Image (cartoon, grey):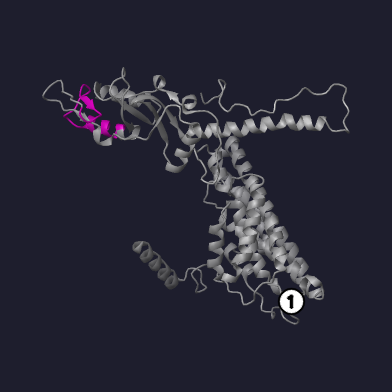
Amino acid sequence: MWRSLFCATAAAVTLKLLNPFRNGKLVPFQVTYDRTWDLFELWFFVTIGLVCGVVGMLQNRLTLYLMEYRQRSVLKNFARGEVVVVALGTALISYLSVYLRADMVTLVSNLFTECTGQEADGLCGRKDRAGNVASLLVTSVLRVLLTSVACGLAVPAGMFTPSMATGASIGRAFGMVVQTMHENHASWRLFAACRPDVPCITPGVYALVGAASMLASTTRMTVTVVVIMFELTDALIYVLPIMLAVTVSKSVADAFGKDGYFEGIIHLNGYPFLSMDQEYVLHGSSDELMVRASEMTVVTATGETLQSISELLRESPFSGFPVVRSRESMQLLGYISKSDMAMVAKRARISSLHTDASPCCFAHGSNVEPPSTQLQVVDFRPWVDSTPITISHGTNINLVAETFRQLGVRYLLIVHHGALLGIITKKDIVRVVRMQSRNYARAALPPLLAWFSSLPSRQTDSPLPQQQHGRPPILSSESPVL
């Protein structure tokens, strides 16, 4: 803890001395608001959360679709050319708009800035406020499209700052509309809490709320976004509007799918990931899901030679091997990864004390005698995990999934009285979760069709047969998992 505090202090002092943002502040767009907000503005903040929730969801969908299309099309063979074309297209489109042409950090900083009432032009001017609102909305649409295309290119391109810029543009435009309503209709009951001759609406706050809402809908983060925005403004009084808008935005986005942008990339690339925020309700047991021991490649504690280990490493596609006492008893003694085994075998081959006939030892207490006095035993025991995580056969599959999620392990060994029965990997659980999602979607379609057919407006001579409303089995003999 003290080391973390010291490193954070050193980083803050370094930032203050170097002043990389050229504004004398520790963050690129730190602002301070002198005005407070009124209760009637909460409805506007909720509306911003609704709009940004939908926009963020659409941006994620479009981005992931383009990434998937890029992976299965010929574009993946022309990565450099694609970068050049996208860069030229972005430059041409951005030149037409002052809000796209500006640096993104500078733009967000200007959108967050509070108007003093003395500006005649720009975001704070009254002359062309309608044009600025229209430009901000068009900029938001174009930025969503450009961000979706840029993410996934063969260059470093993120979603964080562009999402903030899009949300800030939407929020600022909405705030300018509300500000115009107050200036032209100050006598409305909606603005009864505003004092006369005093600015009541701060468009910069709406931009801040819009940026937070867009971040929440894109990344599905809540507390982190609120803390970041609080650090940017250094004003505790605006935490409540930000929390409200972030909650609404995330709820709207979750209605179309629980996965955010980063989770979508994980699923798109096929990485075995189990979310900590999602509850998995599966059906079956570990016996139905595991790979049987008869189908596995195991290593015996004794009886292996350096040549047999080298052949095993060259031919086996697995990333690790259980260590058993013998193939007859299948008594589990440990587990060793393929990378560690390859490293030890490579060192042994380089050494002059070992040949292909050198015996290998994988377990403590195993007496291995070399065939001659000139040869030494290849000792794999320091790299063997003698206490791998195991579960009993017949364990509920929900407990297995919870073990993977909470402990973060990649595999679980199934044993019965110390004998190895099989293995389950995290990829197996992910496949079952995806199968469950597809089966639920298929099970929900027939009842929906039956409901439509039973409507009074649709008369049919022969009614549809009754559909089974029972939940289909998650694991079956046709499942690719088994």
Q: Is residue 186 left or right of residue 388?
A: right
- Asked if one can make out residue 173 in the rendered structure from this viewpoint, the answer is no
In the depicted structure, whether residue 127 falls above or below residue 56: below
Question: Which amino acid type is marked by label 1?
Answer: Cys
In the depicted structure, whether residue 273 falls above or below residue 122: above
Dividing the image into 4 quarters, which one contains the N terminus? bottom left
Nearer to the camera, 87 or 333: 333
Q: Quadrant of residue 295?
A: top left
Nearer to the camera, 401 or 59: 401
> At 15% from the left edge and 20% from the top edge, which residue is drawn?
371
- Asked if one can make out residue 349 in the rendered structure from this viewpoint, the answer is yes
- So how many labels did they put on this image? 1
In the depicted structure, whether residue 409 falls above or below residue 187: above
Q: Secondary structure at mark 1?
A: loop
Task: List x then y, in percent, for residue 473.
Answer: 59, 26
> At 67% from the left edge and 66% from the top edge, which residue is drawn?
206
Task: List x then y, in percent, for residue 423.
Answer: 41, 28
Label 1, residues with CA under 10 Å away: few <14, some 14-19, many ≥20: some
Q: Which residues are magenta?
A: 341-365
Q: In the rendered image, which residue does mark 1 sit on?
A: 194
